[in-house]
Amino acid sequence: MTKTAKIIYTKTDEAPALATYSFLPIVQAFTKASGIEIATKDISLAARILANLSEYLNKDQKVTDALAELGNLVKSPEANIIKLPNISASVPQLKAAIKELQDSGFAIPNYPDEVVTEEDKKVMACYNKVKGSAVNPVLREGNSDRRAPKAVKNYAKKNPHSMGAWSSDSKTHVATMSEGDFFHNEKSVTVKNATDVKIVHLDINRNATVLKESTPLLAGEIIDATVLSKKALLNFLEAQIKDAKEKEVLFSLHMKATMMKVSDPIIFGHGVRVFFKELFAKHGKTFEEIGVDVNNGFGNLVGKLDELPADKKAEIEADITAAFKNNPAVAMVNSDKGITNLHVPSDVIIDASMPAMIRTSGQMWNAAGKLQDTKAVIPDSSYAGIYQATIDFCKENGAFDPTTMGTVSNVGLMAQKAEEYGSHDKTFETQSNGVVRVLDSDGEIVIEHNVEAGDIWRMCQAKDAPIQDWIKLAVNRAKATNTPTVFWLDKNRAHDAEIIKKINTYLPNYDTTGLDIQILAPFEATEFTLQRVKAGKDTISVSGNVLRDYLTDLFPILELGTSAKMLSIVPLMNGGGLFETGAGGSAPKHVQQFLKEGHLRWDSLGEFLALAVSLEHLGQTNDNEEALVLAETLDDATDTFLDNKKSPSRKVGELDNRGSHFYLATYWAEALANQNKNSTLKNRFTAIANELKINENTIISELNAAQGSALNIDGYYYPNEELTSKEMRPSATLNTILSKF
């Protein structure tokens, strides 16, 4: 037997975390005797809060900083991590998690709405390490390889998801800024030698404020700086609100307030203030007195009204009703509950919301619970064009046909906090008119922008080594698949122009004979790719970090109905592997149903796919024959699972997540019993496969009997482990069989 090798399974949040309580015991049972250790690391939002606020906790309450530990591990060749979707916390989510932990006896401080004291600064610094995309930049020490597995794609063709019909006279469209935004103001530089830059704001009186003292840069590193004009943004929003009213389309704001945790909440807040302009003009002083912060959404304002006297509250509520009547109709998140697109920043995330809208005839839900054409407002124009190009294509060609569509995989530049998602600590809302400068270690100006009070300025980086690795990965995928490969880069955008220079430098290092490798601006790349998709042809998109997120939702949602079924591999730069299990955007609704009805409809298919490639990687790097057979048979089991349609149902009383895990285990055991590559595994699983099969009816009955009533797991963000395990493993028969391993 080879030496024991370790796979780290991350414990995260919401529905994926619940599913882990059911699926992980199966994985541990199946791999236990094959020299494979399955360990867990808790990187949930609650655990990250406790790790960063440890000084406020009792000794027995302290938890290890699992994210920091994994951040070190991903830099080693031994890394083999299965990463489940986690919460990228908006401020409302963060506050809700803090309150839950406080109610559970953890004496952590409140999130400071205003930073006044030194203690406030310290606490805010801790919480800033937790909110937004705190996890992915730490773990993604490699670039991204995302694609639809063959079994999933074939299943989608045989069992097509619903696609709304498109009309050529649809009024749906994208609205984006034509000046004053991040795209138009971007400046980019490749630094020749290693240096350390300082970010400084000079006001009109030349008083200097250091925004960030130190940002070390490596030789060959690209830095971008840009600014979004508040004045231009407000003018744009006012024009779009007026136009939506005139065109009688829904007004819908699409942002990424969870990942772009500094800039996008500010932009979202401006969207709320402009939409309710008259309301703020009349009641602004009152809102200030009760601490309204619409950067956290219109729902923050509504919630704060309870602090007012009844007559004042009634007056404002009447004015809110009038504002909704006088303004364009707003797209709804929940029509029944009156929750609009503007209520919570984390409710409408652009990379999931835009493809869903396009899939549904380009329409969103209105207040009456009916679908309606929509103005999709995407302030920054950097990537808005990909959605307009897709809408234009659907207006001209009609909806896509999942039974004949080609597939679009993605190679994404994201290693070492590349590009926009690495900008959080270098993004600032300017406090006064003046200039923001990036100064090198000699005090020389590298980049500068004129700014006005309220503008949003940001800087981001892309190191040379990750870019080289990204180009290599793109070439390798092109060779492996003989598929046209497109770098989505705009030569007229400052950053992209610097990236193109590097491609022209490094691409000749590889033999690309016979390969179709192109560079196209995002709008043209979208048109090119959609033509191929409709013709049933495959394409590889090669993109930067944010665009990677957008494309690996857009195409999978159109092709497969969901992005959760994508195979997401991160070949780590030092030889390890990070295997991601798909998106988690619908996870909150799944938890709500689980707590109300005892039915979890979360589909763990992404975990099955990630586990198979994780086992394959382990087998190859540790010369573990059994791991390779486990991987191959798990893929076979996943094929059978899909063919037999054992994914969870949406309805209580029918097969849910726990039942789907049972069937996956059964098919996996059968595949192991039927293979002839490894006699040890064959002998080990023959009896188990038989026992699972003959007890099928009993196990399914036990699992389904656990549904139908409300559950208590003592927490949403930090549930009780014993209670959660009990609810997620309700079949005594299945538990007994697994215990025999």
Image: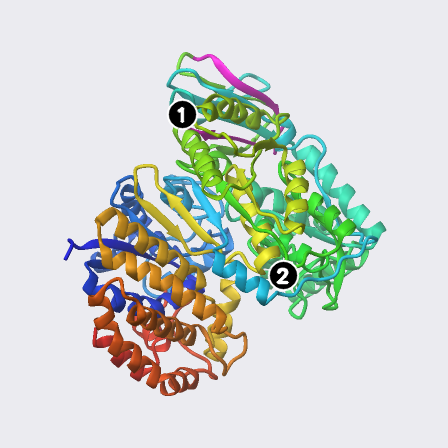
Mark 2 or mark 1: name the one nearer the start of the chain: 1
Q: Residue at x 47, y 26 (%)?
A: 507
Locate residue 626, reporting x and y percent: 24, 59
Q: Residue at x 43, y 22 (%)?
A: 198
Give the amino acid type for the residue marked by disc 2 in the picture: Thr
Crowdedness of circle 2 by 10 Å Cα count: few (<14), some, many (20+)? some
For disc 2, the marked residue is 403
- SS label for mark 2: loop
Give the amino acid type for the residue marked by disc 1 in the picture: Glu
- SS label for mark 1: strand
Locate residue 539, reporting x and y percent: 57, 44
Q: In this picture, which residue range is highlighted in magenta? A: 443-464
Quadrant location of the N terminus?
bottom left
Crowdedness of circle 1 by 10 Å Cα count: few (<14), some, many (20+)? few
Locate residue 434, reporting x and y percent: 59, 22
For disc 1, the marked residue is 213
Locate residue 103, reporting x and y percent: 38, 65
Q: Going by the image, does 728 lie left or right of 38?
A: right
Mark 2 or mark 1, which is nearer to you?
A: 2
